[in-house]
Image (cartoon, grey):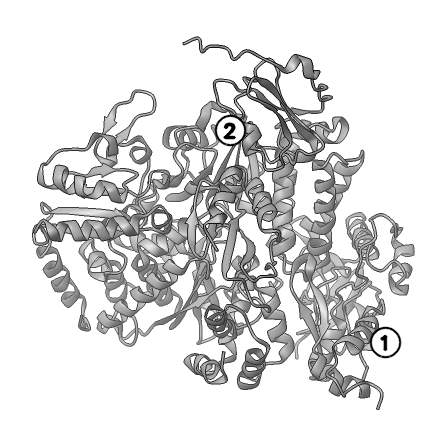
Amino acid sequence: MSRIHSPAELENIRKRIQSERDPRKTCITLCSGSACHASGSREVARLLIEEVERQGLSQTVDIRRTGCHGFCERGPIVVIHPDEICYFHVQPEDVSEIIQKTILGKEVIDRLVYSDPQTREKIIRESEIPFYKYQVRTVFGSNGSIDPKNIDDYLAIGGYAALAKTLFTMSPEQVIEEVKKANLRGRGGGGFPAGSKWEGSRKAPDPIKYVIVNADEGDPGAYMDRSLLEGNPHAVLEGLIIGAYAVGAHEGYIYVRQEYPLAVENVNQAIRQAEEYGFLGKDILGSGFDFVVKVHRGAGAFVCGESTALMTALEGRVGEPRPKYIRSNIKGLWGRPSVLNNVETWANVPLILNHGADWFIQFGTEGSKGTKIFSLVGKIVNTGLVEVPMGMSLRDIIFNIGGGIPNGKRFKAVQTGGPSGGCLPEFHLDLPVGFDELTQAGSMMGSGGMIVMDEDTCMVDVARYFIEFLTDESCGKCVPCREGLRQMLKILTRITQGKGREGDIELLEELSETAIEASLCALGKSAPNPFLSTLKYFRDEYEAHIREKRCPALYCKELIAYYIDPEKCQACMICGRKCPARAISGAKGKIHVIDQNLCTKCGTCFEVCPARFGAVRKLSGVPIPDPIPEEHRTIIRKRSEQ
Amino acid sequence: MTEFTLQIDGKQVHAAEGMTVLEAAQAAGIAIPTLCHHEKLEPFGGCRLCIVEIASRGGFRPVVSCVYPAEPGLVVQTRSPKIDRIRKMILELQMAHAPDAPILQEYAKEYGADPNRFEKEASFCIHCGLCVRYCAEVKQKHAVGFIDRGIRKEIAFVPEIAARECWNCKECFPLCPTSYLQATYVLTESMAFPRGESASR
Amino acid sequence: MDLRRIDQIIDNHQAEASSLIQILLDIQSEAHWLPKHALERVSERLDVPKTRIQHIATFYKAFSLVPKGKHEIHICLGTACHVRGAKQVLDTVQQVTGIRPGETDLELKFSLETVNCLGCCALGPVMEIDGKTHGKMTPSQTAAVLKQYD
């Protein structure tokens, strides 16, 4: 790869790359994101390459290892172009059949193809599968076409054209105007208008400025940024360079969690390749604009996702946030104007510059323009990353795209915004997703984590879980957060253990007010949200725990007991054998009984009791029936009535 | 340096550029409670006790006076039902750690804080950071620092440095509102100082 | 880890104080902990106070001031895994190994940590051992999986 000296040269190289690629040529793409890796895609890739070679197909068949395709529940995913044949759950054993039947025989393998859970209809093409059909994948869609380790793939789909256009036909102020017109709001959680943030830094008199990518994605359950950075690092880089030009920065940082080693690797490689072509460094594309970027790894601290704490960590210190009275886009990293934006925010920038603000604002609601990538996880059939226009309803996302709740369970709540967000119940399902809409309902957009909960989820425990998370992740500097959350955790834990008292809820509310009004940073200020939203919508659960010592969701260990229904038990011995505490007595033909004194509430018996018997029950808030007398425990195994 | 006036509790107060609201108030003789503030040290903003309210968009919003910059025309009130509620809660939270600290007891009386509202915690450190910051900023010896984070955060001496420097200094001792610092020092001295070095010379 | 290697790592980052965390990450990933002599060398060469290093080494979860076990077990407690029953998996692991999160057993065989989201939510609950991801874990499976590691 040699340095590119002008936009014209860039277009020539792009045309050459595109001409070398025949869109009609067979191309096997294999999702190689971290989750598919964990499901075995690395092995599948190895075998695909081997088999293609063995069959002498290396000239006629391309193999491309791409970034995350988004339908993570069904990985490893293989999509064969040009016909867009989509295979799910591909295992190493399937490889030779795929080559034989589909590549050589032009046949589709039924068992690997998507099958609609209701109609059993087979859908072969990726874009027709409901999960994908209802999405608008303007940012994330490119993942399926590019190998993140090869910059030429990005160039082939039009990459760095926005950069060339920006550097040679627009002034920094014009770039900022376009981003403002598009009303691009931060995708990391704050929802702050990016254009205004950039403008503030542009106008600051300091000659040294910085642009920063926040890839510290700490919200548990959210992994969009990781997949974006792993799968399409150049989109983020291109956005960053454009932003640097607009703001007047010549140095940039990408702060990535060290828990994302593949993202670190891919972005470092992308930077090297971009430097080779001259998209980074001195005199980019001959424009006279210089810009360099460095990757900084996080070291395991959620609070470093907060922008001022992140900057402190970049300076080599502990991630303690700074008071927001002095805005960091005026005085940020090293006291200089610093524009920090989330990975997804930066990835939207090249699209806005290529297609224009008018294109961008066709998507979304009045206050929330464009699309948003959500990680749809938890109790959901189609777990994965989805990109939808702002304004789509929660119902459509969870049921049309997400496929609803598995195992016939009922939807209970959806949690958005991570530890700073809240839980929304069933009657909010028709809420359109948008920054202001979610905030008004008592939650927030956050970074895009969308955790679906069903009837088996205890909402008091959800509040306790998030507070516990934050007592560990809080930097510990200020009293309202450190001490307030310490006490809130104690109270919520007591409640889930059946030791709740009258007055606990009021005390939790008081502690919440102090944290909201007096905390140093957004972590503390938003920490009470999960508690306040679950209290608002599920107050009856709190009261049941405190007054009746009952957990309505049958989850809290100290408030439930496992009980084997003597009417249903068929004495098959499975639970007795698997019980790790050896708490179940019985034998073949003798009804099993759990010794409550030995039971550790691990739930194994409940899990393994065959579904046709369903003899194990969870009880809460009611006395446990005494074990039936020994003499009555013998049964005759009922013959199956099928 | 530009000078200007701002209003605190109805009084016109003089300030200069670079001053915080707390400094302006103290210069004008208006009392605001503090725990982590010290005139020789950079503002910390940790205890939040010096919280006040500033007029904003038709109402008032809380800000922490030791770090909030004084501005011309600012309107500040140092007491209100909300401020008092927050200060009371902060004191009660701190007294779960150090109910016997004289300064906490004094403030508790003023704000009606109940020292027994919360169950007592094991550590009587209230994280004012005065010891750590004094040693770093004034003495520049860095003999004591913070470790860990969140509810596990603590102070800890660096034994080699403390063994060398502290016997001749201990200027941080009178700063500690709860005497936790002295207790930690004694423990470190007896358990962790390098062999052959001790405070008794 | 010998001083020469530590110096190399420091030189790779131009001995800049702002690269302190990156340097410690490199030492941690090679030595699997941060030995005291390494920290002293870093303090000396970067000219940063030991208190800052001691705070950083304890503030950030990636670092360990004690040697880790042969097999590092990471249980994901992210919200998606939590909702799918991660706590029961953790309880079982604690029962089988005899250690709690943050601890290493006496034979230095297992170290146990909880992590707050590995980003494999579709496979939740997730248990990662030595970088290998075990997905869709249930309490009854965990004992079997742990037996595979000697």
How far, Cα to Cα, is label 1 from label 2? 63 Å
In the foreground, B151 or A339: B151
Q: Which residue is denoted by mark 1 in the rendering?
A: B174
- Secondary structure category for the residue under label 2: helix
The amino acid type of the residue labelled 2 equals: Val
User: Which quarter of the figure has residue B168?
Assistant: bottom right
Up/down of C52 relative to C116, above or below: below
What is the x, y in percent for residue C7? 47, 84
What is the x, y in percent for residue C14? 44, 82
Of all residues, the one furthest to the bottom in this rendering is B201
User: Which quarter of the figure has residue B182?
Assistant: bottom right
What is the x, y in percent for residue B13? 78, 68
Label 1, residues with CA under 10 Å away: few <14, some 14-19, many ≥20:
few
Label 2, residues with CA under 10 Å away: few <14, some 14-19, many ≥20:
some
In the foreground, A441 or A501: A501
Q: Chain of mark 1?
A: B
Up/down of C24 relative to C108, above or below: below
Q: Residue at x 31, y 57 (%)?
A: A235
Do marks 1 and 2 both belong to one polypeptide chain? no
Q: Is residue A598 left or right of residue A572?
A: right
The amino acid type of the residue labelled 1 equals: Pro
Viewer-side label of 1, 2? 2
Residue A202 appearing in the image:
no
Q: Is residue A68 left or right of residue A123?
A: right
- Secondary structure category for the residue under label 1: helix
Q: Chain of mark 2?
A: A
What is the x, y in percent for residue A431? 48, 31
In the foreground, C125 or A627: A627
Query: Residue A608 — which label?
Result: 2
